[in-house]
Amino acid sequence: MSTRKAAEGTEPPIESRDQLVAPMEAGAKPREQWRIGTEHEKLVFKTSDHRAPSYDEAGGIRDILMSMRRFGWEPVEENGPDGTPKVIAMSGVDGTISLEPAGQFELSGAPLETLHQTCAETGRHLDQCREVGKDCGVGFLGLGMWPDKTREELPIMPKQRYQIMKAHMPRVGKLGLDMMLRTCTIQVNLDYGSEVDMAKKFRTSLALQPLATALFANSPFTEGKPNGFLSFRSHIWSDTDPHRTGMLPFVFDEDFGYERYVDYMLDVPMYFVFRDGTYIDAAGQSFRDFLKGELPALPGELPTASDWWDHLSTAFPEVRLKSFLEMRGADGGPWNRICALPALWVGLLYNDAALDAAWDLVKGWTMEEREHLRNAVPAQGLDAPLPRGGTLQDLARHVLDIAHDGLVARGRQNSMGDNESGFLAPLKEIVESGKVPAQRLLDSYHGEWNGDIARVYDQAF
């Protein structure tokens, strides 16, 4: 059983700015080492009454985690808020299974070479979830947000950092607790070859992130009723914490690179510092002060590389940089769309001609136009108007053609001789129909479900 090690006493302090840039610089890899990392979260519910299970109850979240041992997963412990060790994750060859604040079940997949491997990994994980779910009396739902639960109905997992975040969120936004407790996402982590390559991929994916939000929009219900949005999960980010979210205008500056992202992260307020098995509350405090030994939460101490890495994970922009780029715009969804998201971004970003073509589509937009599109998409989806005429649906057709060509050019085939472009099929169907997943759910709600939100659980894995 593994545990997280305390940084205190095991690492030297950060003494230069070069150490802040180091994680980004270390991420640059030759093309043959580029990999695909896919993360996906699921809502967990008791099949008997659709409630969200607590951590400790029989058949609850802890039991679900521990049941994964039959597949070779090993428990990861961390001291809970009461100081006693808690199993908060599972580690295995397919990556890490971890918990979001209200028990959302997440696979952070291994770095893989092809989309065929990614989709096989996803299939294995969901098969394992189904088998464990039968034993524990739970199901797993691929949506962007709880369709019927209030905040008060949801449990909090025994992770110290979540207690700190839960207390801090209401100070900086109205919807941060909804982000923590009620949402699910699919994310893709991708590599870059150099600082220049990183900047180009960052700009292109950031400008196109609203398209991913529209294609994967899957959160139209709040507390049992339509909420007026197609991706309420995306809307939530607009009122979570303005210091650590958004479209990052500086990414589109000509001089953008690692150093500028370090400056941004130094301006992002902290959440915590991890010492000796404990998360120390530093919410709202400055990493710049930490570098000077003037952090109020730990006066006189200097940060380590682990502290900086922890801090890099506490910003939530639409695209995030650590030692790789994270695509963060998509709602949670079912199996085929889990595979489709990495297909979209790998097709666009891992082929030079595709990357050039994708950037050409969006490079003329102003920052105001980018922000306007991002703000329109949660409610309008593919009907959102483009800056220079037409709708996002029109752009989507071009982008999917580019992604298709990029995947074909990669030439990564499975044992049947199929390339990776087939994983785009669910997205092509969405674009041709003009209906994003949330609109199909709303059609069902107003039609065959006759307003009975419980029918959404028929969508479970």
Image (cartoon, rainbow, N blue to C red):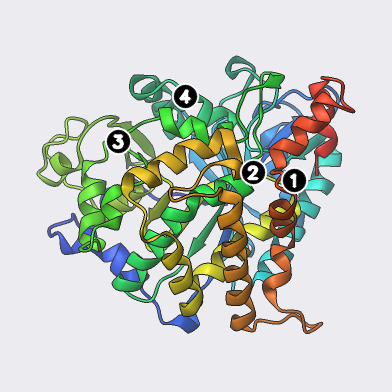
| Image-based side of 264 in relation to 428, left or right | left
Residues under labels 2 and 1: Cα distance? 23 Å
Task: Name the residue carrying label 3.
Answer: 243
Q: Which corner quadrant of the image does residue 408 belong to?
A: bottom right
Secondary structure, mark 4, is: loop
Secondary structure, mark 1, is: helix
Residues under labels 4 and 3: Cα distance? 14 Å
On screen, 46 above or below 104? above
Task: Name the residue carrying label 4.
Answer: 175
Rendered location of residue 255, percent (x, y) = 20, 63
Dot 2 or dot 3: first in sequence order is 3
Using a 10 Å C-alpha cutoff, classify the residue at mark 1 as few (fewer than 14 neighbours), some (14 to 19) or many (20 or more): many
Of 320 and 68, which appears nearest the observer?
A: 320
Residues under labels 3 and 1: Cα distance? 39 Å
Rendered location of residue 51, percent (x, y) = 74, 23
Secondary structure, mark 2, is: loop
Amino acid type at circle 4 is: Leu
Residue at 29 percent across and 48 percent down: it is: 249
Rendered location of residue 210, percent (x, y) = 50, 47
Dot 4 or dot 1: first in sequence order is 1
Residue at 17 percent across and 30 percent down: it is: 296
On screen, 255 above or below 169? below
Judged by depth in the image, the label closer to the viewer, 2 or 1, is 2
| Image-based side of 250 in relation to 126, left or right | left
Residue 137 seen in this snapshot: no
Of 228 and 54, which appears nearest the observer?
A: 228
Amino acid type at circle 3 is: His
Dot 3 or dot 1: first in sequence order is 1
Dot 2 or dot 4: first in sequence order is 4
Task: Give me the disc on residue 67.
Answer: 1
Task: Give me the disc on residue 332.
Answer: 2
